């Protein structure tokens, strides 16, 4: 490779990275809608296995799953808003429980008088006004709700245009042979990514339901909200399960003011994560996305740096799609082999 080619390659990479970063407000909803269409299409195909829905036209099945998706998104937004209001109401009680917990801990360690806990609390916790965070959070939720609406709108248009894709590919590629190759590539991407996302979504729903039952038995407040959050964060490889468990553990600490109960919550939710992630997921999913673990970690770091939480969730399906495309081009096929798990692409 010549120095000129290397320079052009580095410049092109930097330019693409800058465009991805600056174009985040537009690209994230579009890609999120595309990923949603994968799941919705897999769900629509799965409806053919249900006797009552087997004879429904394809458009009717897609309409049903799109309606269910819309209702789910609206329900998620309503759940977030409702729980935020309840958290604001419960804040004084949580602060009181944490105050009593730290005071007991200081007494056990014998440091309540050096300096006094009252002095430490006045200098630290009392300087934090939790209610002052609510207004910026409400504005963030307003933007989140608008983003969800755009994703649903894009997904609806993508679903509507799936039927004309084959005809447009024939025209765009200039012949039947090229269009068949493009369609075959799209079919492989659809099968790989759609299968991965559908199974992952089902597993996350099972994980959320199991976590909800455990938190309900323990008596944790806002159990449904935390269960949805656990299932949502589980889309993020490696770190998502840890992040999902931390929040309800911290809430249980504030709610009950007990390290013992918080430890029990952590053990129970971690056990649910292990059952789903280490036992059930490998059996149902196998190696659906065929990516090296290091590549998954690298993709997670790259996309989360560019797009934050949205990038972390979309990292695996976007990288898996890229590997499939690279495998179809002779000059980039060695790169696809290096990015895969076993070298078979």
Image (cartoon, rainbow, N blue to C red):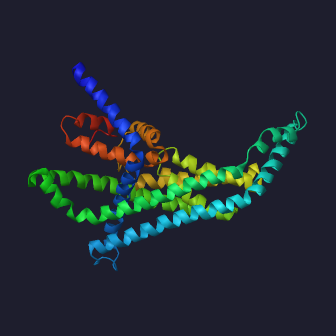
Rendered residue at 82%/43% (across/down): 105
- Residue 251 shows in the view: yes
Q: Residue furthest bottom?
A: 52
The residue closer to the viewer here, 116 or 141, is: 141
The answer to whether one can see residue 220 in this image is no
Quadrant assignment, res 307? top left
In the rendered image, which quarter contains the N terminus?
top left
Residue shown at the point (21%, 60%) measured from the top left? 165
Asked where in the image residue 211 lies, by quadrant, the reply is: bottom right
Please say if 4 is above or below 287. Answer: above
* Numbered marks: total: 0
59 to 253, vertically: above or below? below
Above or below, 318 relative to 301: below
Q: Nearer the viewer, residue 340 or 314?
A: 314
Q: Which residue is rendered at x = 31% and y = 72% of the image? A: 48
Q: Residue furthest right?
A: 113
Task: Pinpoint residue 300: horizontal percent, then vertical percent.
Answer: 44, 41
- Left or right of 12 on screen, residue 307: right
**What percent of the width, then of the height, locates residue 72?**
47, 66
Task: Examine the image and state in which quarter residue 125 appears.
Answer: top right
Residue 226 position in % (x across, y down): 60, 58
Left of 148 or right of it: where is 221? right
Left or right: residue 57 compared with residue 71: left
Furthest toward the top, the residue is 3
Question: Residue 244 appears at what percent x and percent y?
Answer: 57, 51
Q: In what quadrant of the picture does the C terminus appear? A: top left
- Viewer-proximal residue among 46 and 1: 1
Q: Residue at x 12, y 55 (%)?
A: 171
């Amino acid at each position: 490779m010549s120095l000129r080619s290397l320079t052009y390659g580095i410049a092109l990479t930097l330019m693409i990275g800058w465009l991805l970063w600056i174009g985040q407000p537009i690209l994230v909803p579009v890609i999120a809608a595309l990923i949603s269409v994968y799941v919705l299409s897999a769900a629509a195909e799965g409806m053919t296995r249900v006797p009552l829905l087997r004879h429904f036209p394809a458009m009717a099945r897609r309409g049903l799953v799109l309606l269910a998706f819309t209702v789910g998104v609206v329900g998620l937004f309503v759940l977030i808003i409702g729980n935020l209001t309840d958290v604001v109401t419960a804040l004084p009680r949580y602060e009181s429980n944490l105050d009593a917990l730290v005071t007991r801990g200081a007494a056990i360690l014998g440091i309540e008088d050096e300096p006094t806990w009252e002095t430490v609390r006045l200098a630290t916790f009392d300087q934090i006004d939790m209610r002052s965070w609510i207004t910026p959070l409400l504005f963030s939720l307003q933007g989140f709700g608008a983003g969800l609406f755009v994703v649903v709108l894009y997904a609806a248009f993508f679903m509507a245009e799936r039927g004309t894709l084959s005809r447009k590919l024939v025209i765009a590629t200039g012949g039947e042979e090229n269009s068949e190759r493009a369609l075959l590539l799209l079919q492989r991407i659809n099968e790989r990514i759609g299968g991965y996302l559908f199974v992952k979504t089902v597993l996350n729903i099972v994980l959320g339901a199991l976590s909800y039952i455990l938190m309900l038995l323990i008596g944790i407040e806002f159990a449904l909200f935390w269960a949805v959050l656990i299932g949502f964060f589980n889309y993020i490889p490696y770190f998502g399960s840890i992040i999902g468990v931390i929040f309800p553990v911290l809430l249980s600490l504030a709610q009950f003011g007990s390290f013992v109960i918080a430890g029990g919550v952590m053990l129970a939710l971690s056990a649910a994560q292990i059952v789903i992630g280490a036992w059930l997921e490998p059996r149902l999913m196998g190696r659906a996305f065929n990516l090296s673990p290091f590549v998954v970690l690298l993709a997670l770091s790259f996309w989360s740096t560019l797009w934050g939480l949205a990038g972390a969730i979309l990292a695996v399906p976007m990288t898996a799609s890229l590997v499939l495309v690279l495998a179809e081009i002779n000059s980039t096929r060695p790169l696809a082999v290096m990015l895969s798990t076993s070298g078979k692409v």
